[in-house]
Amino acid sequence: MRCWLLALWLAALPAWPQQAPIVVGAVVSETGLLADLAREMRQALILWQEELNAAGGLLGRPIDLRLLDDRSEAAAALSLYARLIEQDRADLLIGPFGSAATVAASASAERARRVLVNATGVTRGVHRPERRYVFQVPAPVAQYGEGALALARAAGHSRLQVLARNEPGAREAAERLAADAVALGMQVVVQMASPGAAGYAEQIAAARARAAEAWIAFGRADDAAELVKAFKRARYAPPMFLAQGAAEPEFVQRVGQDAEFALGIRPYDPRFATRGNAEFAARWRERWKGEPGLVAANAYSAALVLEAAVRTAGGLEQERLRAALAALETETPIGRYRVGAGGVQLGAKPAVVQILRGRAEIVWPRALATAQLRLPYPRWDQRQVHAAQ
């Protein structure tokens, strides 16, 4: 009888009110020219939402993910983030796909004094000293040459030949590397080139004339492949050769065995021995199949940083969140999150890989290395054919 009365009494009690969800808003290019490139961003945010909700949510509340489509039009981000803020009442904001769209989104966030975690914008126009509410998670393109410079210094090279594809990101990386190298007392020549650059004969002649010790190029996989072809034709081999695009699988496909010993730049790899990366890559394979790429890792890491800031702030109040993100230091699959003035990312460092037996092995930084660096870059008459692994 007592059990029955207790059951009646419990049934008469008012139910605990269900916690309202935390609305997280982001803009993703789901249609248009950028849709294929941006797909991993959407998948990464969904994966984070599913994992967090399965673990009990954030601050005891479920995550309601609101994704809007900018149709691959960067300018649309301005009004879409205003909509997320004003109509959807988003509690938290994650930046859109691409640097140009992130610049537009930042304007809405700053105007409304709302925190925006930048998940993909890497060019310098995104972060300015006067901005207070925008925080970058991916490594800026200006830092892409850091590993190249570190390896050149370690090898004792002081004469650098720097080549950049004539486009904003490559120019920015080359200019920053040159400035850093000059500050270290190195001799640097920077050249810009259009794709192909008429066989790169002029650039090779200039490097030979000054006995350049390290050739560092910023551009795409096809640029790196054309450079190697030009080197072979000219029987030219600098002691160190690094081309950003040499890290891409397309580079090896284009030049085969001639890809050996080239160095490349890779901001993310599923093999990174960074905190949580092995688990992230495993869950990605289970949920979406295949390997996660840079866009996926950047977006997932951005969501983790935002989550950590909310826990640190103990709530969703924007000024406390802003202060938390400015001071936060945490580890993510792409590396360390730590920002400086204007919210610029300082912690995450793109890795350097080297093509060894047809595979891109990580050789810098040492903590992430999967193989030992092989220098000097061998002369063409000293090379041997190796079986690909």
Image (spheres, rainbow, N blue to C red):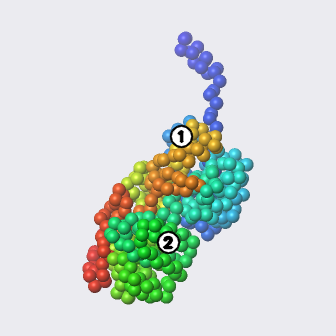
The kind of secondary structure element at disc 2 is helix
Residue type of the residue flagged with mark 1: Thr
Residue 26's place in the image compared with 358, above or below, is above
Query: Is residue 257 visible from the viewing direction of this image?
Result: yes
Q: Label 2: which residue?
A: 174
Looking at the image, do the residues carrying marks 2 and 1 touch, with CB atoms under 8 Å apart?
no
Q: Label 1: which residue?
A: 312
Residue 271's place in the image compared with 163, above or below, is above
Residue 186 versus residue 352: which sits nearer the camera?
Answer: 186
Q: Where is residue 107 drawn, in percent x and y?
A: 68, 57
Residue type of the residue flagged with mark 2: Ala
**Residue 322, numbered circle:** none
Q: Residue at 51% x, 42% y: name it.
A: 54
Q: Residue at 64% x, 55% y: name it.
A: 130
Q: Where is residue 377 drawn, in percent x and y?
A: 32, 76
Would you identify the image quadrant in which residue 307 lies? top right
Q: Where is residue 7 drawn, in percent x and y?
A: 57, 18
